[in-house]
Image (cartoon, coloured by chain):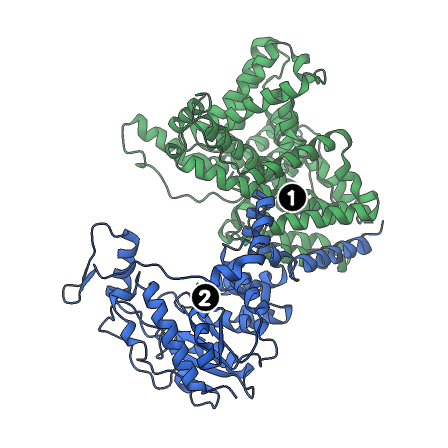
Chain colours: A blue, B green
Amino acid sequence: MRAAPVMFASIIAFAAMEGTIFHTGLYPWILNPDASTGYLETILRNERERPKDGPQILGIGDSRMLLLPRLSNQHTPETGYTFGTIAAPGASPRSWYYMLRDTDPAANLYRAIVMAVESYDDADKFNGEIDNEADLSYVIAHLRLSDLWEYSRSFRDPKRQWKAARGILFKGLVYKRDFEDLMLHPVSRFRYAKLSHRDSFGWFYGYSGPPDTLSDFRVDWAAKTVTAPASADPARVEGLKARLLDPLPPETGDQGRYLKYWLGKIHERYRGSTTRLIFLRLPRGGWVRPDQPRYDPHSSVRELAAQPNVTLIDEHFFDSLETPELFHDELHLNGPGIDRFSLMLTQEVSRILGPPR
Amino acid sequence: MLFNTPQFFLFLLVTLGLFYVSPQPWRRWILLIASYFFYMSWNWRFAPLLLSLTAIDYVAAIWMERVETPRRRKLFLVLSLAANLGFLGFFKYYNFLASMLAEALRKDAHAFALSIVLPLGISFHTFQSMSYVVDVYRREQKAIRNPIDYALFIAFFPQLVAGPIVRAREFFSNYYEWVPPVSEEKLRGVLWILLGLAKKMALADQFAQIADSYFKNLAAHPGAPAAWSGVGAFAMQIFFDFSGYTDMAIGMALLLGFHFPANFRRPYLAFSITDFWHRWHISLSRWLRDYLYIPLGGNRHGSLMTYRNLMLTMLLGGLWHGASWNFVIWGGYHGALLGLERVFGRKKFQEPPHWLLYPFRALLTFVLVCTGWVFFRAATLHDSVYVIQQMFSWHGKGVLIPAWLGCVLALSLVIALLEEKTEWIESLAHGPAWAYVAAVVTLLFSVELIGVTEKAVPFVYFQF
């Protein structure tokens, strides 16, 4: 045997098998629907496969973008629009771009895409989203070899850049944990994945939020304390304290640069299309801390709002929801809160778009 | 620069490229520069130490050859050994001895301690260097006249940090009659590298997580099943880690046209402790036999002296691994088992038993070896005793090794059993191309899908 052709054949064989299994829909089909990657795949698959009769509106955001299409679509006879959502826990604007690219390949499927952001002022975060490693796991199934340079360079930390680059090349490296879990229970995984393919649309569509509220909690801004009932979950109390009482992160402008890049890229995809990009500011929580981030007239969304197909919902539109009775933890609305949020959003988006033509 | 990092593979590719495109006379320089670059990538401050030891032994060997009087020859030998053992002793054992002295003087354990960083691979390259000097003294090896050649023998990067400990005559017979590797050797080289990488990343590093979680918090995992799985995981970690490193070293050497001796031969299939030491870290066992056990008298002076020599060799072998009483006990434990096997009849433990008995003997040997690993891995003697108590406590529940890793292990056992019969891995390079391609693809997938790639885990034997 000559070494060079055999080595070459080995590399080609590996690349072909890796490509077939991980760079197609083959492995994503069997992902664990409960893990973050599989969860996102399920949501995106459900949205792709959802029948789309009439004008469509798509919501996108993280776990706080609790638009319930079940409620919104009860109003379709009045509004004329059908709502769907691909919001997923932990999904950030960088992921939104790739999620939208595969959900709406021709950038013309929706009358509007409603994007939920935390702030209109590009407030910085302690763990900025630039180097959020989890992003890679979320969208790995949607990254192409041609994304290698741009996607990996979008991380600032060289280690994460390297991790992203090798992950796009060898996707099995990113699916590793899921693969180990698959090896533990291959039969039950296959069954669960099959069940998820068949039924998960209904699971998500029928979702209604938790009933718990924060009405028994008290916040004393002067004393900087959060008082919770004795039965409260300590993790929830700690989360609330951190959200309300910890000092704000220093202003670095990192988040602004990050958002301008990725929201700008999303806007670029929809430039000239009939799709309107609508931004909303998420309800901030059961209590609003007095030291809000500084107003930034040149923030990413405010600058985008100057574009013809971009609309910003009034920043204070959801202020009425910012009450402890409508939240179940420091970030998320509870069942009644979600219902009200969905209805308010449905009506406002329908109003902005006007009756379908 | 660890063997299991992309940086190392880049370094290897560049080195191989430069080596093969350069004219023959430059090649020794390229290998030497690459080897020092590799060594200095860890800690450049130790390069003068490596260089000094190389220079001392190089000069000592030449002088030893030049002088005729036995006393002067011995003097150069002693000077060379003193330098090697002096450096090794200082860097590796100073703090151990200092803590014992402090204890004897009833002072704080750290009263005489120094902040010493152990130079990478010092235990290996000093042993390799000493074997050369002793061979020259015994007139079994001619002194090497070209300092570049000798420096390369000591610093050759595939085996610099963790062996195998290569004898000078093995290295130089290969070196002075160097022929470029043929296709089959290149294919074997690549296969050994990938096999070593897969052993390290897909098996050793997986088992390391289990062993670490067990040994770092013993109280959290009481009972025999947890203890056996923790200790068993360490047994697998250390084997796959060290043999993985050796496979990679052998593969790299093959690609450069060098043939290293085997360092492991499926040690967990050993049917006795004697057999185990013929299969585990063979180059060290051979070194200890040739430069310690035999010079001590070996088995030439009656049973009692043989047991003494055996015990001394194993105690020192244990201490070579690290400066702690646990390693001494580990060495002593193996010395005692080897002695016991001699008491019951040497032949019985050197020749394989009937095939029906083989599995039971292999299992018993594995249990004995695992019990020894407890001393090797546990942080203190107290911990070692606790773990052994748990192992034989016959209570508790909760195996720490996940089922899928158990399946992978079972598969590797089947591969080892087949390999024991036919050595088919070696023959893959001259078998059908499809079989070779299938093996490479399988190894690459095992690294990709099972390998621990989040961080590069250092090789266990790098610390020695």
Q: For residue B281, which quarter of the picture?
A: top right
Q: Is residue B181 above or below residue B236?
A: below
Could you tell me which residue is drawn at 37 percent across and 41 percent down? B114
A84 lies above or below A237: below
Which residue in the protein does label 1 denote?
A: B196
Query: Foreground: B102 or A256?
Result: A256
Q: Residue at x 63, y 71 (%)?
A: A146
- Three-letter residue code for mark 1: Gly
Residue B49 place in picture, x, y as percent? 52, 46
* Badge 1 density bin: few <14, some 14–19, many ≥20, Cα 10 Å: many
State the residue in front, B435 or B204. Answer: B435
B344 with respect to A120 (left or right): right
Q: Is residue B220 left or right of residue B74?
A: left
Image spot of residue A320 (x, y percent) = 27, 75
Give the labeled residue for mark 2.
Answer: A131
Callout 2 secondary element? loop
Of labels 1 and 2, the one closer to you: 2
Visible residue check, residue B134 = no
Tell me where residue B56 sits by quadrant: top right
Is residue B168 in view from this perspective? yes
Q: Secondary structure at mark 1?
A: helix
Callout 1: chain: B
| Residue B221 position within the rendered picture, expressed as x and y whole percent measured from the top left | 41, 33
Residue occupying the point 29% across, 79% down:
A294
In the depicted structure, whether residue B21 falls above or below residue B117: below
Task: Name the amino acid type tagged 2.
Answer: Asp
Instruction: Using the image, name the chain to which the residue with label 2 belongs.
Output: A
Q: Nearer the viewer, residue B37 or A26?
A: A26
Spot occupied by residue B225 in the image (x, y as percentages of width and height): 48, 28
Picture layout, residue A118 above or below residue B210? below
Number of other residues with Cα within 10 Å of mark 2, as a class: few under 14, some 14 to 19, many 20 or more: some
Residues indicated by labels 1 and 2 sit on the same polypeptide chain? no
